[in-house]
Image (cartoon, rainbow, N blue to C red):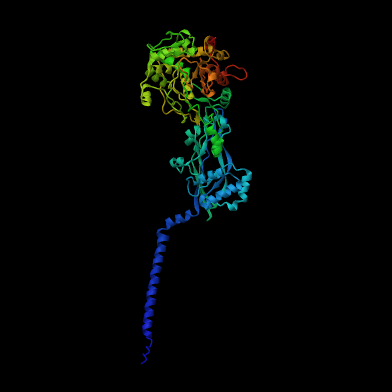
Amino acid sequence: MPQPIRLKDHEKDARLVKRRVLVGGMVIILLTCVLIMRMYYLQVIQYEHHSTLAENNRIHVQPLPPTRGLIYDRNGVIIADNRPSFSLTVTRERAGDWPSVLDTVVEVLELSEDERTLFERRVRQGRRPFEPVPILFELSEEQIARIAVNQFRLPGVEVAAQLVRHYPQREHFAHSVGYVGRINEQELKRLDPTDYAGTHHIGKTGIERFYEDELHGEVGYEEVETNARGRVLRVLNRVDPKPGKDIVLSLDVNLQEAAENALGGRRGAVVAIDPNNGEVLAMVSQPSFDPNPFVTGISFKAYGELRDSIDQPLYNRVLRGLYPPGSTIKPMVAVSGLDAGVVTPQTRVFDPGFYQLPNHSHKYRNWNRNGDGWVDLNLAIARSNDTYFYDLAHKMGVDRMHDYMSRFGLGQRVSLDMFEETAGLMPSRDWKRARYRQPWYPGETLILGIGQGYMQTTPLQLAQATTLMATRGKWIRPHLAKSVDGRLPVDPNPIPDIVLRDPKFWDYGIHGMEEVLHGARGTARKVGDSAVYRIAGKSGTAQVVAIKQGEKYDRNKVQERHRDHALFIGFAPAEKPQIAVAVMVENGESGSGVAAPVVKQVMDAWLLDKETGQLKAEFALPKSAEVSQR
């Protein structure tokens, strides 16, 4: 039987539709309320926050690096300046696939694979987001044109003009002024990112590093409006950077050149100091190098040649070179012996050509193997008699020797503004026990008295010890900066003066030094005879390799780089010191024959008038002094 057909219930369907419409309407109203509340929250309650975020999307703060301070010599000659240069920069966030962009740069400019590696290292180096990173400096006009033609292939790459450090004197002041270089990863970690925002270079060595805070300046900034692609539309606000402070050095370009010429291309060091104020007048370490390639990034090949050179041009011999002082310290030892009371000016020692400790057979040779006979203190300095100073050192003992020589600056850093300086070594009992776990032997005291053995000094320390002789113990730390932004340098840790029991002891030591050049038996009298002023000086010879007992030094049997070093110290005019000089010539062999002429040439360049050949007016001696000199 067929099923009955049900009729449609229109009322029921209408009620269902009404309920659905009502529910749907309520949902819509609810969602609308939520949307309105959300809009109210975002646009009213969070207005300030989102307004700032929106503003940041179009306004950027760009750092303005300060101009680095300039460096001059004492006469106003520029030593370090800033010159405009075009650099190639990459902004990693705008470059997209930046390694591919670097490949394109190398292709367009026809560069080497080593330079490509250097570019990638620079881009990977940590820096602020959206900060352009210079990858290539000093672009030529041709390179700029190639970049412009291929700009569509180089997103995020721009040519930017900036000031780059330049050293017009090149190698002449590389070891004193130093150079700046790119900030590396280690430096980034310790530097304030705000202070160095936009700055890509920092002082690496020398004055550039020591006075970095003064030379760098203060960073500025500008607020700029940009479009969605990061292009600057307009500048909204600007705070100019403060340039770094200028520094005037005590160095003299002409004296520096004269000292270099005096060395004559030999390996060595020259330091000249004004004893009246501690100003370093010349500071030469030869051979030297051109610091300019280090500013923009020296190539691996060029750096390798400098680093591996047998002559070590990167090595600062003035501050880091350690050499036995040899006989140059004998005047200081003599003054110390007088003050210690172990000798008098009249004390005499018989020199048969050697010295022996009591109850010992070992002979400590004098350089003059025939001996000088009876020798007093004055003749001992003039003749550089080893036997006399063996005896004096034995009487003083190592403890007093260490104490007195330390007061002359040996074994410690003496400079005011040369951070690279090495302390050297003034040995003692405690030092040897700690270093070698051995006692101190009497024979080691003897050779200490003639500046040999464990003692190690730098040419700067010898120059300072010479200055102390010239000033009769007045301590003024040597410094390179004559003024920083017009202000004189201040020593935060002054060293006490050397005060002797009797000031006349200085006179005995200085008179002996004058006899070295002007006495009848002085070791450097040939140099002194040609001087128009009196010089107080002392020669020295430092052994590079030891000579066995009983053997004689034969230069023909020794390799050139194993021959003795030649040293000479001096100040002049002896009556009114205006310059103190220390010279070290590596493997020069003769202090009197090789180093002494260098000292005199430097003194002549500073003291004499070029036209008359006489002392300059400001250095002229009083009439009474001239009479006593004659």
Determine whether 51 is above or below 414 in the image: below
Report whether residue 471 is seen.
no
Left or right of 206, for residue 106: right
Report whether residue 397 is seen.
yes
Determine whether 454 is above or below 181 in the image: above
How far across and how far down the image is residue 139, in percent?
A: 60, 43
Identify the residue at the far bottom of this view: 1
Where does the N terminus fall, quadrant-wise?
bottom left
Q: Residue at x 55, y 46 (%)?
A: 89
Q: Residue at x 41, y 10 (%)?
A: 344
How far across and how far down the image is residue 572, in percent?
A: 52, 17
Where does the C terminus fall, quadrant-wise?
top right
Residue toward you, 545 or 539:
545
How far across and how far down the image is residue 236, in percent?
A: 52, 50
Determine whether 331 is above or below 195 in the image: above
Residue toward you, 528 or 376:
376
Determine whether 279 is above or below 39 in the image: above
Residue toward you, 528 or 315:
315
How far across and how far down the image is residue 378, in percent?
A: 47, 10
